[in-house]
Image: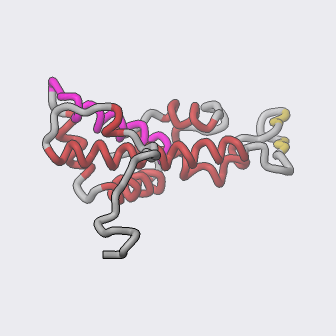
Amino acid sequence: MAVADYTEYDEVRAVLGVSSDELPDEAMSGSTAWFALKLDLSDVGATILSDYATALAITSPNQVEQSFTELLKVFSTYSVANQLLDSLPMFSPKAKLDGDTSVTRFSSSPYKETVVSVRSSYLRFRKRLVRAYELYLSGASAVSDSQLSVMPLFGGSASPDYDPVTGA
């Protein structure tokens, strides 16, 4: 198995806003990237890798199986991108002059918005993947958007199971 079995390198580059010259496939295809992705996925579920392979092999997937495989791919993209955030200034220089002979790097971090965006998307898609995986494991065949939603619901009402006036 490899990172490319779960996401496309161009998708990771698009999330980070870099080109293939700045971030070649080789930087994402190594064993470290794969092991980190595998750990991220295993945190969602111990058998998620084999369950994903099973779901992918289904010729006519139901809505839950389709949602599970799609969310796993999207999460994988953000997982790999999240791994690369700390080194983003190293592979995305400010200027490259005369080939590799002179490279100018940013003195500050112009990537703050990218870091915030990638990290928040990583967490959002992780939560959605967890929910989709739970539905997949339950054997459900249909899913609504609200079932995969990660937005908290506010404004409901609740009644205590005791009398708040008398305390009984």
Percent position of residue 159, x then y: 34, 58
Q: In this picture, is 20 found above or below 108?
A: above
Residue closer to the observer: 5 or 161:
161
- Looking at the image, which residue is at 23% across and 29% down? 63
Farthest residue, direction top = 60
What is the total number of numbered labels drawn onto the structure image?
A: 0
Q: Is residue 141 left or right of residue 108?
A: left
For the stretch drawn in magenta, the main secondary structure is helix
Residue drawn at the location 42% of the way across and 44% of the way down = 150
Assess whether residue 69 is covered by the magenta stretch. Answer: yes
Q: Is residue 86 above or below residue 51?
A: below
Image quadrant containing the C terminus:
bottom left
User: Image check: 37 left or right of 16?
Assistant: left
As rendered, which of 9 and 119 lies closer to the eye?
A: 119
Residue drawn 49% across and 35% down?
9
Closer to us: 133 or 23: 133
Residue 97 x/y as whole percent: 85, 34
Q: Position of residue 79 (x, y in %)?
A: 48, 48
Residue bounds of the magenta highlight? 59-79
Left or right of 120, for residue 136: left
